[in-house]
Amino acid sequence: MSELSNTARAMVAKGKGILAADESSPTIKKRFDSIQVESTEENRRAYRELLFTADGIDDYISGVILYDETIRQSTAAGKPFPEVLASRGILPGIKVDAGAKNLAGHPGEKVTEGLDGLRDRIAEYRTLGAKFAKWRAVITIGDGIPSDTCLHANAHALARYAALCVEGGLVPIVEPEVLMDGPHDIDRCDEVTERALRLVFAALYDHRVPLDEMILKPNMVISGTECSTQASVSEVAEATLHCFRRGVPAAVPGIVFLSGGQSDEIATAHLNEMNRMGGGPWELSFSYGRALQAAPLKAWGGSADHVAAAQKALLHRSRCNGAARDGSYDESMENAA
Ligand code: 13P
């Protein structure tokens, strides 16, 4: 088996998933605003140190996605973050896209930028210790959108990114995110997610990306946030599995879901239910940002006195999601915390 294929499998090892800690500077500022903490370089460093050094998370976390600033930062004691993670058996990854920008001629739609110079950046990230990368495309559901133009443009960019990663020795996480914002129902999310996945896999094939050397990071098939009828946990699990069986080739080693604004406990319950139902050819795991970090962020609140409480909160969510990897999560785990 190739090195990349081994890494891809390690990213979706049994009982484990990925911590997305790759918030860009504008996004981490929004998160810090919510706890009234100033987004200085030192505060961002201290917060990421707390996450990466939390006791016990290596039992449940296979990899961490870092941001450009973060992969170059170190602990207060001077140990670079990629080394901290690697010494715990956690794979360091890196967000390499340059963000979703307005798609010209297509109001309300976005295309992700960042292909220019990507080959050289991948080479540098490798020297900094990265083993995998992430590129996020954003698809919005609304009146008359997504357009096929938007879906094609994003699929093309994802495939070019993934091909460059494989060439340069990083496992690409391919992330086409259909946003959950809006009044649409779960059937509409299902239809758009399937179309997005089919176009992404067609583009990956055209660009000769080996599917066993990548990981897919999609949204779940879920009701829009403002939809009047919200699908239940079992309906979401069933619809998501059904959609992915149609659209995701069996050669892909793993699917790691994003949380996308779902509450911590619902994101865990959805993953748990899918693994309880089972029947897919791929590992079903998590690559949560908000659903892993909301609790520790709040517990920390910017105070060095609360680091231990924040680390405990991260360990708790990691343990719950680790249990959801084989369908053994139960709500009683929440009360036991
Ligand atoms: P959320 O789980 O907060 O959606 O973040 C995951 C991620 O990395 C989005 O790109």
Image (tube, grey):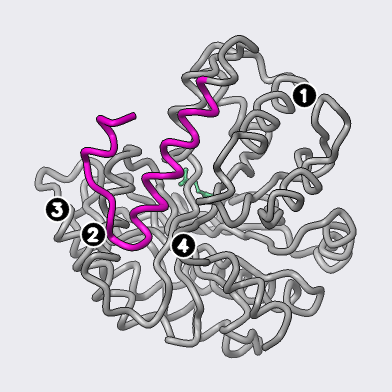
Mark 1 or 2, which is nearer the eye?
A: 2
- Picture layout, residue 180 above or below residue 78: below
- Evaluate whether residue 168 shows in this view: yes
Label placed on residue 231? 3
Residue 256, position as x, y percentages in the image: 46, 62
Circles 4 and 3: CB atoms closer than 8 Å:
no
Going by the image, does 84 lie left or right of 99? Answer: right
Q: Report the magenta residues as a range.
A: 309-337
Q: Give amino acid for label 1.
A: Glu
Q: Earlier in the sequence, mark 4 or mark 3?
A: 3
| Badge 2: residue crowd in 10 Å (few <14, some 14–19, many ≥20) | many
Tag 2: residue type? Glu
Q: Which residue is mark 1?
A: 41
**Front-lying residue, 38 or 142:** 38
- Whether residue 109 is in magenta: the answer is no
Picture quadrant of residue 154: bottom right
Q: Are marks 1 and 4 in contact (CB under 8 Å)?
A: no
Task: Classify residue 145 as left or right of residue 13.
Answer: left
Give the distance between the C-alpha atoms of the residues marked 1 and 3, in whole angstroms.
Answer: 41 Å
> What is the three-letter code of the residue carrying label 3?
Ala
Q: Earlier in the sequence, mark 3 or mark 2?
A: 3
Q: Which residue is mark 2?
A: 273
